[in-house]
Image (cartoon, helix red, strand yellow):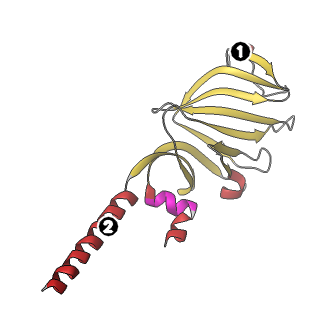
Amino acid sequence: MAYCRRILSWRRIVLTAAIAVSLILLWPAECLTAQCDGRLLFAWPVRAGETFEISFTHSLNLSPVTDVIEWTGEELVVRKSIFKTFGAGIPVPSDGIGTELKGVDGHYELTGIDKHMRSVTIMTQEIPDHRIRMNGREAFLLELAGSGRSVEIEVRRVLLFTRLICTGRLHAIL
């Protein structure tokens, strides 16, 4: 009789643990995502007020440009653009983009852009070679999607299970 109670007790523990793990894996969280042709390239957790960067090489003057974008909890907002040199296609306040342009430590910062968007679409090419950076992570869109592909960057709710598959960490767990 005691043996049967131990088996039932272990079955309850295993069942409870399985339910708990299932609930955790199916728990959705807001994530910064990149998608190409319906395929999730990455999904990084993001909170309201956090920023990420889209960095690329300017196609005309071949200098680095970084756009800083904030997730407000509702939408993406371009807050500033950082660049080393001026050239065609580099915005300035007189173009009606941003409110202040200042030199900072050998580069320029255009602030006050405040462009509101639901998503950012990027066409991958060798130049500009777009990269996304956030919280110590970096994703090279050309490597993830291939050349000449349209990649959509947005924030959406993603299951932990999906994030683990996307990052390859589920394989390490299993």
The image's mark for residue 127 is none
Q: Position of residue 104 (x, y in %)?
A: 80, 22
Identify the residue at image location x=23%, y=72%: 12
Please rate how many residues cluster around mark 1, counting C-alpha atoms within 10 Å: few if below 14, some from 14 to 19, many from 20: some
Residue sitting at x 44%, y 61%? 161
State whether residue 106 is above or below residue 150. Answer: above
State the image coordinates of residue 78 (x, y, percent, origin top left).
61, 29
Q: Quadrant of residue 70?
A: top right
Q: Horizontal placement of 150 versus 9: left or right?
A: right
**Does residue 5 show up?**
yes
The three-letter code of the residue at mark 1 reads Glu
> Could you tell me residue 97's position as x and y percent?
68, 19
The answer to which image quadrant residue 119 occupies is: top right
Q: Earlier in the sequence, mark 2 or mark 1?
A: 2
**Labels 2 and 1 touching (C-beta < 8 A):** no
- Kindly identify which residue carries mark 1: 100
Q: Secondary structure at mark 2?
A: helix
Quick one: 55 or 23, which is closer to the camera? 23
Q: Is residue 157 above or below residue 162?
A: above
Magenta-drawn stretch, dominant element (helix, strand or loop): helix
Q: Which residue is mark 2?
A: 17
**Which residue is painted at 59% across and 25% down in the image?**
115
Q: What residue lies at 34% left-to-right and 63% top-to-bottom? A: 22
Residues in magenta? 161-167
Mark yes or no: residue 148 visible: no
Q: Nearer the viewer, residue 19 or 129?
A: 19
Q: Residue furthest front?
A: 2
* Residue 46 horizontal side relative to residue 21, left or right: right
Q: Secondary structure at mark 1?
A: strand
Residue nearer the viewer, 142 or 148? 142
Q: Depth check: 18 or 79 in front? A: 18
